[in-house]
Image (cartoon, rainbow, N blue to C red):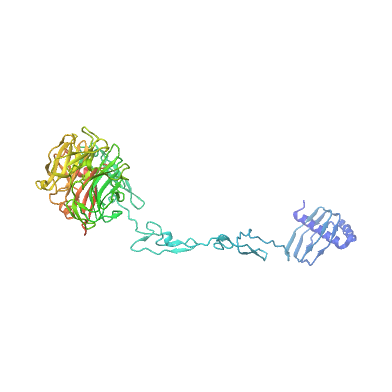
Amino acid sequence: MRTACARTFEACVALSLLTALGACGADGGRAVQDGLADFEVLADVEVADVEVGDVEVGDVAVGDVAVGDVAVGDVAVGDVAVVDAAVVDIAVGDVAVGDAAVGDVAVVDVEVGDVDVACVPKTCAEQEADCGAVSDGCDGELDCGGCEGGLVCGAEAPNRCDAVCTPTTCAALGAECGTVSDGCDGELSCGGCEGGLVCGAETANRCGEVCAPATCAEVGAACGTVPDGCGAALACGSCPSSESCMTAGPTRYCVDPGTGSTGGTDVHTKTQHHTSTLLFNPATDAFNVSYHSFRIPSIVRTKSGTLLAFAEGRQCSHADFGNINLVYKRSVNHGVSWSALREVVGSGAGTWGNPTAVVDQQTGRIWLFMSWNAADKSQSGGLNPCTGAATTAVGPGDRPVKVSHSDDDGLTWSSPVDMTATLQPAGTAWDAMGPGVGIQTSRGPHPGRLVVPAIRRNIYSDDHGATWHYAPLPGGTSEGTVVELSDGRLLRNDRAVGSVWETAKRRWLSRGSIEGGFAAFAPHDTLYDPRVEGSSIVYTTSPHRIVFLNPASTAERCKMRVRLSYDNGVTWPISRQLHDDLTATQTCDLHLGGYSSMTKTADYHVAALVERVEAGAGNHRGIELHRFNLPWVVDGTPEP
């Protein structure tokens, strides 16, 4: 078998023959053909340093050429340079190459000179050029046009139509510090932070404080797991086996459900819980106007469990008259956190006061009773603190009874309706609802009755507020509280009028019913009173527990004390000072105490609103919120 090299050489020989044929003509061709007959073997042929100059081959016709067996030995081809070779019109006829054996062929240093190839210009589209001038790739230039629609050629990339990039600013990005992209492949330096703040402490490129994780004590968690305020969780332990970990916002605490509904003989052994905060703050709370003081609280729990806390917002001073509006806040987590200040009513420049709320737990409607007087009226005369104009003492009809209601859990309120003709005794001059809260009865001949305390009477409804009536009381008292006793009767626990109070300096109590009337009021020796409003609620019905709160003093509005009665208010064997981290004298020095209002929360706590005088100049008044449970009240004392 012939090698590839042999076959290559055969072709070379054939080409040589063709060249010879063209040079020699017909006669020479025959001579070459005759010579081939004797060409048997070409061995050991060495071709060295062959230089082929300008060779031009014209029209060559090659006829039938038969190449027999050719054996080519070792052929070495040295430096071959082909320059400017043009081959034109070569016609090769039938060429038969027989067996040719080509030996080793080495081709070294072959240099091909100038060979011209025609250049094909590129288009704008091929180069993705939208605009401007670009090379066509063949020493020419293309004009790719311009841009439309406000676009600019080369705004972002060469020969492309784009919008001009406008760098943004630190302010537009809300960046206070550090470096940020300007949106145009550049970088903005937004400065540093001052006052000990750190860039990116909480949010990228914002100045903030380095987050300090809260503790379980700081968030009021005695059990469970709560956020630490810095993205992690706090494990605050577990409760004793007989108690459950209750949740109220971030707060977690242990409670025995039995202490909230049916009671229990071991309440004194359970976990205590008590927190407080300034709920109505004259320094920060405002609605349409800012307020000098907040006074006269009322708090109720709605059918859904929402807490509604009401107060008088006194615009110009802490006085009882002038521009006073009824404002409130809502809490949907048992009083742990609260909404911003809202307004029930504030029209005109007169006084909307004495909020007294009652909830119909059957219909869900919340009723809010109130008293009103014009800007030029007051209880006993004096200068209007807002206008400086003189006021005159109210006369009959000058202090009407008004009532509003809410059917959406306290989100909105109806315009107050005047109920004076129905609910105020004829000839009444100074009058006041509550203040505080009303009740809905669960016992007696009229379960579901709504009862609202007012001066010298109880207002009531047996048809869910479709109609209202009042039942008179014996004289000698003014602002009062009302609770239902275990036998279905009602207990009024009232503030005595001046001359009566001077005889005992105590709370005055009376028991009775709407239909049967009430006994004469009498002072209770245990219940000290500095002649101020107090608050009462029934905490549980089995055992029957009444909670009462007022200043335990005969001289000052301080020393606020929570008391418990288990025998319908006859005795009050267990009590605890509300501000338990202070001495009684300190509560007076700090002016902590005054009017109050209480309700029981859905998580077995008492939520209590309590007035206080704010520190500093101005004699401003605020209202605290205290949350405490029954174990805190008994404080380790076994219940009777």
Q: For residue 267, what is the image quadrant? A: top left
Task: Give residue 630's position: percent from left, percent from top.
Answer: 22, 42
User: How many numbered discs?
Assistant: 0
Report the front residue among 384 and 261: 384
Left or right, residue 208 beside residue 144: left
Q: Is residue 474 left or right of residue 62?
A: left
Q: Position of residue 413 (x, y in %)?
A: 30, 45
Give the quadrant of the C terminus: top left
Residue 473's place in the image compared with 189, above or below, is above
Apparent side of residue 148 relative to residue 581 in the rendered image (left or right): right
Whole-percent x, y for residue 248 in the image:
30, 45
Question: In the depicted view, which residue is nearer to us: 131 or 452?
Answer: 452
Task: Give above or below for 463 relative to 228.
Answer: above
**Residue 403: percent from left, percent from top:** 26, 43
On screen, residue 331 versus residue 424, left or right, reads right
Viewer-nearest residue: 440 or 544: 440
Q: Is residue 532 visible?
A: yes
Question: Along the line of sight, which residue is nearer the eye, 410 or 555?
Answer: 410
Q: Residue furthest right?
A: 27
- Point out the residue furthest to the top here: 445
Task: Name the residue rendered at 37%, 56% in the picture.
Answer: 202
- Residue 271 visible? The answer is no
